[in-house]
Amino acid sequence: MDWIWMIIFMMIIGAVIGGFTNFLAIRMLFRPYRTFYIGKWQLPFTPGLIPKRQTELAAQIGKLVVGHLVTPESIKKKLSEEKFKQETEVWISQKINSWLDKEMTLEQLLQQFRIEKPAEKTTAYINYKIEQKYFALKNIYMAKSLKEMIPQEWSGMVEEKIPQAADQVILKAIGYFATQEGKDKIKVMIEDFLKERGKLWNMVQMFIGNDSLADKFQPELIKFFNNPRTKEMLVNVLRDEWIKVQDKPIEDLLAKVEDDTLLDYIKQWGSEIIQVETIFQKSIAELIAPYREKLHVEIAPRLLAAVGDYLTTRSGEILERFEVEAIVREQIESFSLQRLEELVISIAKKELVMITYLGAILGGLIGLIQGIIVNLIS
């Protein structure tokens, strides 16, 4: 029976040696981390394989990533996958909805980009541009006549409207002078006219009287306005004035208007049209509400397609500009050896343990074979 115990003993010794040898070999991939010397003589196998070759390993992994893993072809393939496109569109839509549901105002959004008082700055910018445009247009057009400024069609349209304008003036005049207020105005005008003539005023007052004279003038004045010749005269007067106005330079027409006054009016008019403060206080969701469906259905897919096409055509250039190979190399070189060891072992822990067990099994089998051979020989 002694030979059986001898075989078992040799199997155990072989298993221990085989397992320990493989375990030591795995550890020697990383350990020791640094070189040891006895005097000037470097101890063999120091440092370990990976510490000694870390720079070369980093360079090779960088080339592997760029040459075989993250390549322009792999990026193009991924971007062209329909499943990836659909998932990305859904993700973008979810992000947009989540962002819009926060009810963030336009002012709050700009403040996140360190833009303070956007409404005040926008108003100041608009007013500045209005002033610039006003003086630029003034320098260009002030010396020109109104006829040069407006299209000929507009001038013709104004001339066509002159008879209608004359009718309106006459109707307003008749309506006014037919009232008691108009009659009183006639009386005042007659009095003012006759008072300047001294004795004539006293004679009229003595023989006719103020009220009687106004009563006689009122229907005659209305009859005057109803006369077709009055309209003809008024039309001719308005047409002549319109011709004169067209020939005058803009500078003469606006001679009594000060720049500051006109600019204030334009700025006020602009602020009423573009309510800057109100716009910046509205939420982003409210501002884009009319376009929200279009944003999801058309804009987001088009934007995604445009980005995808750009990345597809420029992926090689992008990888080159980002220097992915250098980034991978630098990151691996910057890893501490302990961290690198932990990373590799955590990834291949099960396989490394199996290698240790395999060494023990092979060592045990070798011990069994040796034990049998020894017993046969002896």
Image (spheres, grey):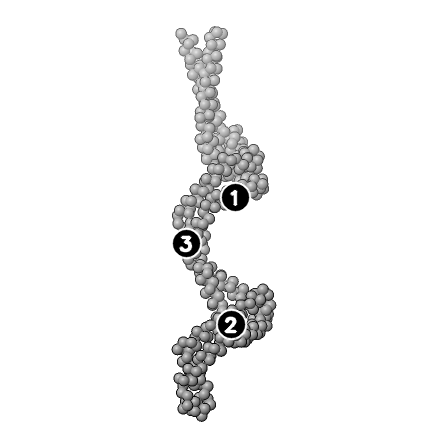
Q: Residues within 10 Å of mark 2 (few under 14, many from 20)?
A: many
Q: Nearer the viewer, mark 3 or mark 2?
A: 2
**Residue at the image position 43 percent from the left and 91 percent from the top:** 203
Q: Is residue 334 above or below residue 140?
A: above
Residue type, label 2: Ala
Mark 1 vs mark 3: which is more N-terminal? 3
Tell whether label 3 touches label 1 (CB within 8 Å): no
Q: Secondary structure at mark 3?
A: loop
Q: Secondary structure at mark 1?
A: helix
User: Residue 181, located in which quarter of the rendered image?
Assistant: bottom left
Q: Position of residue 193 (x, y in %)?
A: 46, 86
Q: Amino acid at mark 1?
A: Arg
212 to the left or right of 328: left
Q: Which disc number belongs to residue 166?
A: 2
Q: Residues within 10 Å of mark 3 (few under 14, many from 20)?
A: some
Q: CA distance from mark 1 to mark 3?
A: 27 Å
Q: Which mark is residue 302?
A: 1
State the mark number for residue 282: 3
Q: Nearer the viewer, mark 2 or mark 1?
A: 2
Q: Is residue 45 above or below residue 270?
A: above
- Tag 2's secondary structure? helix
* Residue 276: percent from left, percent from top: 44, 59
Q: Quadrant of the N terminus?
A: top left
